[in-house]
Image (cartoon, rainbow, N blue to C red):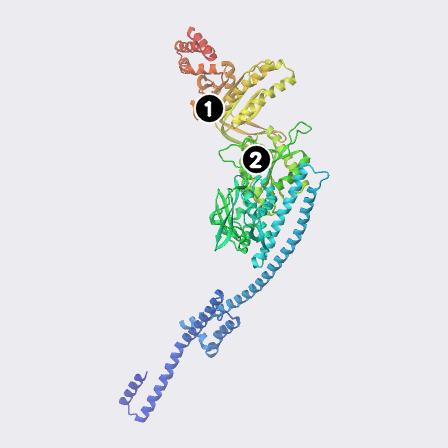
């Protein structure tokens, strides 16, 4: 800046005649003016830069303070709301008041400053909101801590009161059992034992609840004494015996009396064994539960290592650690599979640690679990490191491998005779792993003449249903080991419709989402435990009435008919509902029924027809067919699964007819014969009628052809004929004994229909003879329809030489001779 001034001054001197003194004054004036201009320009440029630098440094310090406050690493730099707001205000106002023109600049630096000001205002508002939220969270956290202490206090007080009530219940039940006068009946004894056992279980669970707060705070107190382990286990097993069921046996030979005494709190040791053995019994429906013990040195201190192992369902390894937390299961599904609240294992771990021992849990999914814990033993007792105690079973449950069959999976808990009408009692199957709950239900239902069956878990229930055990209604517990009530219900619904087998879900939780899940799985209803006797009986009667009503409807409208129409219930069927599909139609008829009917009274006619039809219907049902109509003595049945189903049903009907004729002969009646015709084709199945009366029917030419083929059985003297459409739909024709017998001209059809005889249902001698001559017989039929009557006659004569009872060969031979002569 100085150099340009001197240059200007030199030029001025050389070009003008100004005095030297005046020139010097003028030079200094120019220099001062240039300095002022330079300072103004520098201020204009540096002021916003310094302002932004100051603001950035301030925000950086505040951000570091906030971060330190969040992570809690630097308490000295914790966030101070007053300091924060003061700094932001200083940043916003200090330089602004000194330089008001700064905000009025319109160039790029002015825009940058304006944007930074808006950012500062946003940060200020955000920190104000953050400080307010932090204060609110601190206030809420204080309230939650206070509520948590109140909850623990309330829980402790309530548990103490409940423990008092259960003490009274247990005492009254045991006093009644000990009374010598008027000894109670067997079921009363079982009920009193169940009451006492249930009370003790609830008592132990309340103790677990009381210990939660103490264990969380680390204030639990132990009354250490020397205890006999065998005596402790005997007491626990006596309490848990009802959980094993009547068929199980309990042994304690695995804990000898010579075992050293353990140093422990008696109540806490009872609590440990109750939780571990109780869970093992509950989760092991088939297999064994073993308790073993051995003396070890743990940290140079004599200790007793106790192991409880089972062959139950097991738990995945990755989920065992999560079960150590209070009120937590391995996953949400285990709540339904295992039951309870999940505090048992966690409390056991804390109690073992309080005794100076260690707890280890090992488990393999599907193979069982092993829980091992250590306790200090009496220093006065004999101690040998190699003194291992034999591992004998303490509680053995029935073992059943998958390869073994179940001949009688469940038996009635209260065998009930026939009612006054001679009808069998209503069968109620209770699926519940808790025998005490089942005992209560038996006591409720015994007065209603209901016969109660128990399955201890879902697998047993499904096995019983597979073995053709058919209860009238199922009471299904939601929480069971191995398979939840939801899963059991879904599997049952794959076979039985809700109208056929009602299921009432039993649940402790009356939650809407749980109830909806049960209904979605296929349950008809639900009941909340504890169950009211009158409500239980009313619900059972209602569902039995509805089931019986639907069963009565199905006698008039087959359930298969509804399924084909894609209807769940008969009330959903509307006039005109129909489907179009390919099916096989079976027609059967009794030969010479009119002659038989004339010899019988009306009552005898109905008895005869019903006796015959009641034997034929099951064979059709077994082969996935259903009866569309009874027309006097005739049967019209439909098969949607395939032609093989219809043929198998027809053969089974002929075999059943042989047994029925033997019965008729034994009571002095003549045997009967039937003819069966089968055709396969496209048909329309639906409802016809009027507003007040409708019926299901089939519309198709295929029905008329099946009836026509059945009438041919009378003409040819055979039992079973099928059309070529049915023959073409057989999966493997070689499975049956079939031969071609006819080319039938049908009215309204341009092409003849080939007809085949299926003679699997003939008597063995006739069947074997037809099979031996099948080739030459079919060759004769082809010669006949080729008008080679002489050659056809030779073939039929050869057939009759080997099988003189072949009625169709005789008919064809007579036709050949007639046409050959003419």
Residue annotated with mark 1: 726
Disc 2: CA contacts within 10 A as few (<14), some (14-19) or many (>=20): few
Write down the quadrant of residue 493 in the picture: top right
Question: Looking at this view, is 531 or 776 the one in front?
Answer: 531
Task: Label 2, secondary structure: give it.
Answer: loop
**Residue most extreme to the left:** 14
Visible in this render: residue 327? no
Picture residue at 67% right of the left edge, 27% below the top: 422
Q: Which image quarter is the C terminus in? A: top left
Question: Looking at this view, is 8 or 339 the one in front?
Answer: 339
Q: Which image quarter is the N terminus in? A: bottom left
Left or right placement of residue 658 versus residue 108 in this view? right
Residue 467 lies, with reference to residue 605, above or below; the image says below
Disc 1: CA contacts within 10 A as few (<14), some (14-19) or many (>=20): many
Contact check, label 1 and label 2, Cβ < 8 Å: no
Instruction: Give coordinates of residue 732: x percent, y percent.
Output: 43, 25
Residue annotated with mark 2: 497
Task: Label 1, secondary structure: give it.
Answer: helix
Instruction: Give coordinates of residue 33: x percent, y percent.
Output: 37, 85
Visible in this render: residue 94? yes
Dot 1 or dot 2: first in sequence order is 2
């Amino acid at each position: 800046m100085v150099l340009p001034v001197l240059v200007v001054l030199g030029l001025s001197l050389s070009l003008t005649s100004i005095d030297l003194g005046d020139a010097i004054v003028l030079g200094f004036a120019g220099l001062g003016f240039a300095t002022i201009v330079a300072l103004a320009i520098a201020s204009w440029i540096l002021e916003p830069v310094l302002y932004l630098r100051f603001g950035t440094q301030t925000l950086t310090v505040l951000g570091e303070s906030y971060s330190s406050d969040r992570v809690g690493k630097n308490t000295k730099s914790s966030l101070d709301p007053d300091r924060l707001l003061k700094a932001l205000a200083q940043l916003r106002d200090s330089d602004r008041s000194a330089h008001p023109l700064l905000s009025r600049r319109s160039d790029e630096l002015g825009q940058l400053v304006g944007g930074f000001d808006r950012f500062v205002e946003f940060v200020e508002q955000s920190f104000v909101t953050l400080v307010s939220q932090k204060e609110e969270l601190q206030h809420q956290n204080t309230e939650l801590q206070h509520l948590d202490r109140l909850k623990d206090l309330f829980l402790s007080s309530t548990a103490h009161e409940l423990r008092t009530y259960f003490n009274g219940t247990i005492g009254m039940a045991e006093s009644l059992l000990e009374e010598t006068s008027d000894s109670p009946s067997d079921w009363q004894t079982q009920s009193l034992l169940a009451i006492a056992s249930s009370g003790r279980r609830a008592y132990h669970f309340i103790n677990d609840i009381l210990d939660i707060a103490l264990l969380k705070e680390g204030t639990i107190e132990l009354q250490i004494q020397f205890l006999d382990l065998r005596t402790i286990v005997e007491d626990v097993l006596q309490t848990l015996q009802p959980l094993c069921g009547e068929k199980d046996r309990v042994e304690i030979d695995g804990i000898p009396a010579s075992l050293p005494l353990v140093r422990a709190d008696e109540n806490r040791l009872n609590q440990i064994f109750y939780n571990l053995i109780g869970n093992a019994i509950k989760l092991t429906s088939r297999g064994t539960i073993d308790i073993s013990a051995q003396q070890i040195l743990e940290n140079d201190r004599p200790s007793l290592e106790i192991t409880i192992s089972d062959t139950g369902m097991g738990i995945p390894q990755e989920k065992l650690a999560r079960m150590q937390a209070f009120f937590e299961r391995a996953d949400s599904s285990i709540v339904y599979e295992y039951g309870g609240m999940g505090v048992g294992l966690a409390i056991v771990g804390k109690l073992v640690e309080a005794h100076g021992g260690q707890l280890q849990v090992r488990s393999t999914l599907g193979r069982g679990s092993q829980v091992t814990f250590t306790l200090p033993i009496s220093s006065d007792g004999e101690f040998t490191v190699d003194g291992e105690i034999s591992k004998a079973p303490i509680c053995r449950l029935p073992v059943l491998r998958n390869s073994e069959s179940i001949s009688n999976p469940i038996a009635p808990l209260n065998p009930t005779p026939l009612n006054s009408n001679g009808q069998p009692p209503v069968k109620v199957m209770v699926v519940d792993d808790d025998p005490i709950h089942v005992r209560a239900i038996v006591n409720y239902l015994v007065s209603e003449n209901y016969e109660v069956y128990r399955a201890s878990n879902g697998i047993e229930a499904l096995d019983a249903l597979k073995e053709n055990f058919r209860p009238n209604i199922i009471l299904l517990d939601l929480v069971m080991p191995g398979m939840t009530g939801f899963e059991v219900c879904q599997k049952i619904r794959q076979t039985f419709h809700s109208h056929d087998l009602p299921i009432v879900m039993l649940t402790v939780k009356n939650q809407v989402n749980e109830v909806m899940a049960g209904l979605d799985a296929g349950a008809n209803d639900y009941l909340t435990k504890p169950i009211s006797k009158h409500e239980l009986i009313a619900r059972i009667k209602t569902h039995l009435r509805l089931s019986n009503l639907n069963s009565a409807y199905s006698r008039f409208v087959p359930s298969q008919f509804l399924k084909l129409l894609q209807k769940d219930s008969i009330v959903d069927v509307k006039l005109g509902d129909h489907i179009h599909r390919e099916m096989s139609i079976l027609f059967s008829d009794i030969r010479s029924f009119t002659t038989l009917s004339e010899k019988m009274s009306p009552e005898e006619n109905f008895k005869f027809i019903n006796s015959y039809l009641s034997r034929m219907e099951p064979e059709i049902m077994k082969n996935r067919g259903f009866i569309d109509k009874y027309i006097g003595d005739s049967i019209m049945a439909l098969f949607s699964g395939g032609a093989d189903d219809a043929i198998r049903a027809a053969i089974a009907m002929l075999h059943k007819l042989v047994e029925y004729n033997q019965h008729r002969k034994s009571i002095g009646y003549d045997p009967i014969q039937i003819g069966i015709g089968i055709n396969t084709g496209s048909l329309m199945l639906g409802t016809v009628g009027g507003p007040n009366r409708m019926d299901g029917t089939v519309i198709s030419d295929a029905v008329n052809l099946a009836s026509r083929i059945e009438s041919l059985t009378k003409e040819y003297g055979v039992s079973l004929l099928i059309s070529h459409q049915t023959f073409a739909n057989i999966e493997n024709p070689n499975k049956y004994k079939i031969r071609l017998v006819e080319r039938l001209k049908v009215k309204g059809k341009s092409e003849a229909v080939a007809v085949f005889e299926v003679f699997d249902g003939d008597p063995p001698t006739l069947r074997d003879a037809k099979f031996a001559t099948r080739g030459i017989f079919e060759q004769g039929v082809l010669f006949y329809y080729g008008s080679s009557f002489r050659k056809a006659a030779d073939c039929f004569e050869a057939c009759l030489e080997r099988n003189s009872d072949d009625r169709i060969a005789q008919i064809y031979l007579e036709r050949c001779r007639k046409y050959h002569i003419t």
